[in-house]
Image (cartoon, helix red, strand yellow):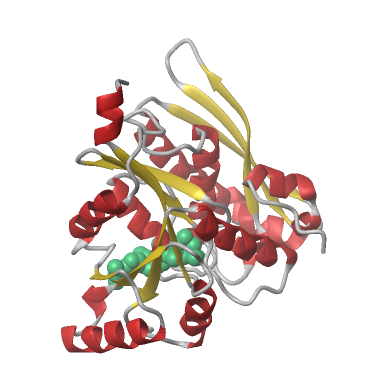
Amino acid sequence: MTADATASTRCGFVALIGAPNVGKSTLVNALVGSKVTIVSRKVQTTRALIRGIVIDNNAQIILVDTPGIFAPKRRLDRAMVSTAWSGAHDADLVCALLDAKAGLDEEADRILTRLASVDHQKILVLNKVDLIQREKLLALAQAANERLPFAQTFMVSALTGDGVDDLRRTLGAMVPPGPFLYPADQMSDAPMRQLAAEITREKIYQKLHQELPYQSTVETDSWTERKDNSVRIEQTIFVERESQRKIVLGKGGATIKAIGADARREIAEILEVPVHLFLFVKVRENWGDDPDRYRQMGLEFPKE
Ligand SMILES: Nc1nc2c(ncn2[C@@H]2O[C@H](COP(=O)(O)OP(=O)(O)OP(=O)(O)O)[C@@H](O)[C@H]2O)c(=O)[nH]1
Ligand SMILES: [Mg+2]
């Protein structure tokens, strides 16, 4: 790249932070225009930092999806929350997301307090505007700005796409000047085998209820490209107890079969080649205390 081209481009990291379930991952996917990170109705879906990359004009915006911030109890919770804050500190800009319907609840308030000590420009994003009336939005925007002054405030619906183009344009204009850090056509820095494991985890979240999804994790064990252009993928779903293994398998293997079919379809769509997906379910008691599982997820293992 010539000096001139470098001078005219911009590139930077934008961290999206907020409470669980406010729609951070949905917004990252909407800004990128492609699925790079998984979404579910359940809280605490995202576990590690996931980067989605998009170009707007001459700016490359590297969006950092983070785990939802809440009061952590378990070791995995602590790892997720500390990862989220490190994502905020390491970025060039921070977008604080609020669920417009939930408003400035206790969780949001705690995040704003701590956000005050983050030394970057901050943008307020009120998400899920499709769920509430405009007048209430203005009051919420004002209340949040009184708590913490934001450089700008946006009102968007990550689900319908309302306001998303505007936000992308502004982020592009705000990231610092500099050369692109990724090839122009790259949408994520996560290896495909990691996204494939995440997609299977998303399908588990969709199919199963209660606490079970949270007590499972998925890893891609092998990935083989075959001569006929198809891919053979083997994944292991780790659960903590035999009873959970039975739930994931379902009667006569019906549940795991349905999870596998959904995941296979979506992975094949992204890869644009036929996929053969083989899922195994293993009991690993206390995998939540196993440093290897954290390494696989891309999380630091908290000492206690
Ligand atoms: N109505 C509506 N629903 C939305 C919107 N954005 C996200 N959602 C829904 O909110 C739920 C949570 O979305 P996620 O994107 O997984 O939320 P998150 O903030 O990444 O959650 P964690 O990863 O658990 O912290 C999903 O059911 C989404 O479909 C929106 O703009 N409007
Ligand atoms: Mg998420």
Q: Residue at x 49, y 48 (%)?
A: 50
Q: Nearer the viewer, residue 260 or 80?
A: 80
Q: Position of residue 104 (x, y in %)?
A: 40, 86
Q: Is residue 135 left or right of residue 202?
A: left
Image location of residue 253, percent across then percent down: 60, 49
What quarter of the picture does the N terminus occupy?
top left
Q: Nearer the viewer, residue 17 or 58?
A: 58
Query: Ligand 1 quadrant?
Result: bottom left
Residue at 36 percent across and 28 percent down: it is 183
State whether residue 40 appears in this view.
no
Q: Relative to 14, is 43 above or below?
A: below
Q: Is residue 65 left or right of residue 57?
A: right
* Side of 177 relative to 37 (left or right): left
User: In this rendering, is residue 30 above or below 143?
Assistant: above
On the image, the x and y values in percent for residue 72 come to: 66, 73
Q: Quadrant of residue 47?
A: bottom right
Please give the count of numbered marks on the rendered protein.
0
Q: Is residue 294 left or right of residue 174?
A: right
Determine the residue positioned at 48% across, 10% down.
227
Q: Quadrant of the C terminus?
A: bottom right
Q: Residue drawn 36% across and 59% down?
A: 26
Q: Position of residue 139 (x, y in %)?
A: 25, 89
